[in-house]
Amino acid sequence: MMEAEHHRGTGEKCHDPYMRCALYGAAQTALGVRGCCVLSHSPQGCYQLVETAFGWQDADYTETLTLCTKLCEDEIVHGGEELLARTILEARELHVPIMFIVTACGPEIVGDDIVAVCEEMSTQVDFQIVPILCAGFRGDQNRGTDIALDTILKHLVTDDGAGRGREGKVPRSVCLIAPHANANPTWMGDLAWAKEVLTQMGGTVVATLTHDTPLSDFEKVPQAEGCIVLSHDAGQQGAEVLAERYGIEPWCQGLPLPVGFTNTRNWLAELGRRLGAEREAQRIVAQGEQVVVETCRRRWLEQSGMHRAPSAIVADATVGIPLVRFLTEDLEIIPTLVCLRSGQAGTRELLERELAELSLDPKVVYNTDVYQARSALAETRPEMVFGSNVEHHAVEELGIPFVLQVVNPTWRFRMVDRAYFGYGGMLNLIEIIQNDWLDRYRSKHRRYKARW
């Protein structure tokens, strides 16, 4: 029986969430602007979120800078506006083109007027200042991404009407939104794949909001004909703003992201229709599917042990929703539990439509935390879990044989970006699944004495 559980606002406290707070999501988004400076108006502890976001964005420390006002007890009690102003002035020696101010809970609760401080300081510095009010109490990290995207669009994209009419558009152009709101540990591979197929179909990416995005790209945003949200967890609000202000049409909306044969085929077909490149889309599909089938045949995909095995998915909506069809159709595994730790508007409808089309009736838990996910796993007792390192530890006492780590957080160290989208992404996922499958049979006992 499918069960929709939503605990926010019901009085039950979540002590072990998967999601970080809005400050983290906003910092992720701001750090996607190339060469910027992000100033965290926060205590030093909250600043660690900004440093973590720096790593998630794969930012270059030689180009992108982070600062902190390091609020202490006096500023938290009496306000930190003076310290914020002084820190902004001290940043003049850094010679940055733009500074984003992200705010923690303390200064917003105590009533610091961050916007007023930024307006006053803007006349004394030679860089643009963009305040982003993203205190943790405003929501989770995906809410922070939406807050930051909305603020960035208002401050950096000019609303002069130049892009409203068809004459102001770049033919077959698109703006990509929120690629970083994705629990694939190397989501940069997904972004690269999307850009590659757009190029093959004759499309032009005018801007990516945001990852390694030059400031000059924001001027091109109104020229886009369409936008694609590369996440089921954040970015839809930004797409609605672009549609309302600049007449930029949302593409591939309402489709699961391209993970697995059917999802990739549908996604590419929609893209080909939008770009007038149906034949090229068909070519990419035919070529990609042939590569996957031949590779799995030659490398001997071990599927017999997985055939019709009951499984659980514990992931964000971006990876979790397309995994449902990929596991069911392509690997012939039966999802008996789906726990989505996050998701934006339309997520439930999209998942429910997928389950109905696949004739699946799993237990479903929305907005899950670690405790709720573990309780659902204990109840359903699947043979394998597609999740993260959190589930690897959470099921130790449940006797569940296989935990396949496909989403963040994971202990895997990755030097190379590995897409989940597209046909190369299918092979990457299959490789992860196969390695974790075989890892169960590897001895956990040391059989030799180390020399050191």
Image (spheres, grey):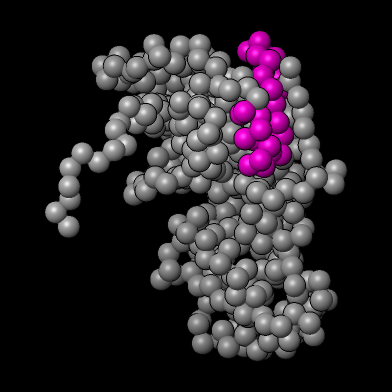
Instruction: Reply yes or no: does residue 356 show up in magenta.
Output: yes
Q: Tell me which segment is drawn in magenta.
A: 352-378
Q: Image check: 109 left or right of 206? A: right
| Residue lying at 38% horizontally and 26% vertically, measured from the top left | 437
Q: How many marks?
A: 0
Location of residue 102 by image quarter: bottom right
| Residue farthest along the left direction in this orientation | 451
| Residue 184 place in picture, x, y as percent | 50, 41
Is residue 166 visible in the rendered structure shown here? no
| Residue lying at 62% horizontally and 68% vertically, measured from the top left | 46
| Residue 380 place in picture, x, y as percent | 63, 22
Q: Nearer the viewer, residue 106 or 286?
A: 106
| Residue 393 place in picture, x, y as percent | 50, 40
Is residue 21 visible in the rendered structure shown here? yes
The quadrant of the picture occupied by the N terminus is top right
Q: Image check: 288 left or right of 269? A: left
Q: Nearer the viewer, residue 419 or 411?
A: 411
| Residue 345 place in picture, x, y as percent | 75, 38
In the rendered image, the vertical position of residue 325 relative to residue 406, given as above or below = above
| Residue lying at 50% horizontally and 11% vertically, measured from the top left | 308
Location of residue 250 by image quarter: top right
In the rendered image, the vertical position of residue 216 relative to residue 437, given as above or below = below
Q: Image check: 58 left or right of 299? A: right
Instruction: Reply yes or no: does residue 371 show up in magenta.
Output: yes
Q: Nearer the viewer, residue 300 or 215?
A: 300
In the rendered image, the vertical position of residue 397 relative to residue 97, given as above or below = above
The quadrant of the picture occupied by the C terminus is bottom left
Q: Nearer the viewer, residue 251 or 179?
A: 179
